[in-house]
Image (cartoon, rainbow, N blue to C red):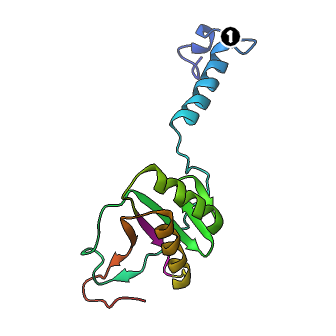
């Protein structure tokens, strides 16, 4: 018995012949944990890794707190709290949000490749929906020693 000096295999109990209830309880608890504490953004469409905000010289100076944030990566694809919406659905979503609170401001995270025409459409929708706090555009500050990219 040089290879098994303690003979531990003889002291083990045999494996169970069927699955006990604890196995199923563990499975249910794991599923419940992910349903209760999981993020709605896990496995949901979101912003890609190539999403880049435009640079601006006064980006930090004009910053103000906002309660509502939307993100645009491409034209007619807007990421809101409830998921991806198009412009028709965004109009309804903005109106519903503006009715819930007064004096809201909207922050728009728009990729630098989004055309200005789309940004103007979103600003118009927000004002008509009742965002009296205004519309702000998210920008990155210009790094020291660099010029602003347009």
Please give left or right for residue 9 compared with residue 106 in the image. right
Please give left or right for residue 113 compared with residue 28 in the image. left
Image point (38%, 69%), residue name:
134
Q: The magenta stretch spans which residues?
A: 106-112
* Predominant secondary structure, magenta span: strand
Image point (60%, 22%), residue name:
26
**Which is more toward the observer, 49 or 77?**
77
Quarter of the view holding residue 145: bottom left
Quadrant placement of the N terminus:
top right
Q: Secondary structure at mark 1?
A: loop
Looking at the rendered structure, the number of numbered marks drawn on it comes to 1
Q: Which residue is mark 1?
A: 14
Image point (41%, 51%), residue name:
101
Q: Position of residue 33 (x, y in %)?
A: 54, 31
**Which is more toward the observer, 75 or 26?**
75
Q: Position of residue 98 (x, y in %)?
A: 47, 57
Quick check: 32 above or below 143?
above
Please give left or right for residue 96 compared with residue 85 in the image. left
Does residue 69 appear anywhere in the picture? yes
């Amino acid at each position: 018995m040089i290879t098994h000096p303690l003979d531990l295999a003889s002291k083990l109990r045999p494996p169970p012949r069927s699955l006990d209830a604890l196995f199923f309880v563990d499975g249910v608890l794991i599923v419940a944990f992910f349903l209760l504490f999981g993020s709605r953004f896990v496995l949901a469409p979101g912003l890609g890794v190539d999403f880049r905000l435009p640079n601006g010289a006064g980006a930090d100076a004009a910053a103000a707190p906002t309660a509502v944030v939307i993100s645009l990566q491409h034209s007619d694809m807007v990421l809101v709290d409830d998921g991806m919406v198009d412009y028709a659905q965004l109009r309804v979503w903005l109106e519903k949000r503006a009715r819930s609170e007064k004096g809201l401001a909207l922050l728009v995270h728009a990729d630098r490749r989004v055309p200005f025409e789309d940004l103007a459409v979103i600003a118009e929708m927000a004002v008509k929906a009742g965002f009296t706090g205004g519309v702000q555009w998210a920008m990155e500050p210009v790094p020291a020693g660099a010029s602003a990219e347009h």
